[in-house]
Amino acid sequence: MFRSVSRTAAAALLMAAPAAAQSHTWTIDTAHSLAEFSVRHMMVSNVKGTFGRVSGTATWDGRNLSAASVDVVIDAASIDTRVAQRDTHLKSADFLDVEKFPTLTFKSTKVESAGPGKAVITGDLTIRGVTRSVTLDVIGPAPEVKGPDGSIRIGASATASINRRDFGLVWNRVLDGGGVLVGDQVAITIEVELVRKSGA
């Protein structure tokens, strides 16, 4: 009798337990994503620019951030500071050297919750063939929504600050009155919209 009751209780517990959340693959929607940066110019102002072509994937079950992962690829040639001459210089061997290094990449190594609606993502950022560990402060991911086409979408914003010299971007020019033409610290903001893979 006791064995029968025990088996019945165990079965009831198994039926009541929530099913393990399924991990989904999410694809970055390039049309609604970009990477922005800001750097000091001549020590008096900030110059801002964007990388307009951001792609990649993420895996996440919608619940457990610690099991999530992110893989982002940025097209280096998509840099745009609204000044063609400056963009050409930034694409040259003095800076990004896009012919040899056509992409910037970020691969997460750890994802942690930082409170409701926030996360911290640590990962390997590679620029110009040099890889350094970088931490992103994230707002999101946003709750899932269904688009007009029926697709399931989420979004997130991430920020970080890096020293460009850590990645071999050392070109500069000393100004006559002191100081330098380009600052070393670069503020980065990444805006992404992700689409859940069909059938996931």
Image (tube, rainbow, N blue to C red):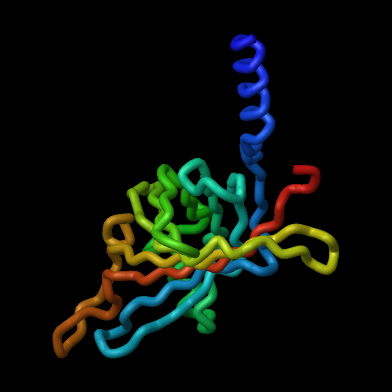
Q: Residue furthest right?
A: 149
Q: Looking at the picture, does residue 10 appear above or below residue 195?
A: above
Q: Choose top left, top right, bottom left or bottom right for residue 170.
A: bottom left
Q: Name the residue: 31% across, 56% down.
A: 168
Query: Viewer-proximal residue, 62 or 68?
Result: 62
Horizontal side, residue 125 vs residue 64: left or right: left
Q: Residue furthest left?
A: 178
Query: Viewer-proximal residue, 165 or 108?
Result: 108
Q: Residue furthest front?
A: 1
Estimate the x, y position of residue 27 in percent, counting from the top left: 67, 52
Q: Name the residue: 63% across, 40% down.
A: 21
Estimate the x, y position of residue 8 in percent, counting from the top left: 67, 20
State the quadrant of the N terminus: top right
Q: Choose top left, top right, bottom left or bottom right for residue 173.
A: bottom left
Estimate the x, y position of residue 38 in percent, counting from the top left: 40, 76
Estimate the x, y position of residue 94 in percent, counting from the top left: 37, 64
Query: Viewer-proximal residue, 52 or 116?
Result: 116
Q: Name the residue: 46% across, 70% down.
A: 189
Horizontal side, residue 160 vs residue 151: left or right: left
Q: Looking at the picture, does residue 38 appear above or below residue 11?
A: below
The total number of labels drawn is: 0
State the quadrant of the C terminus: top right
Q: Name the residue: 66% across, 12% down.
A: 4
Query: Viewer-proximal residue, 195 or 90?
Result: 195
Q: Choose top left, top right, bottom left or bottom right for residue 33.
A: bottom right
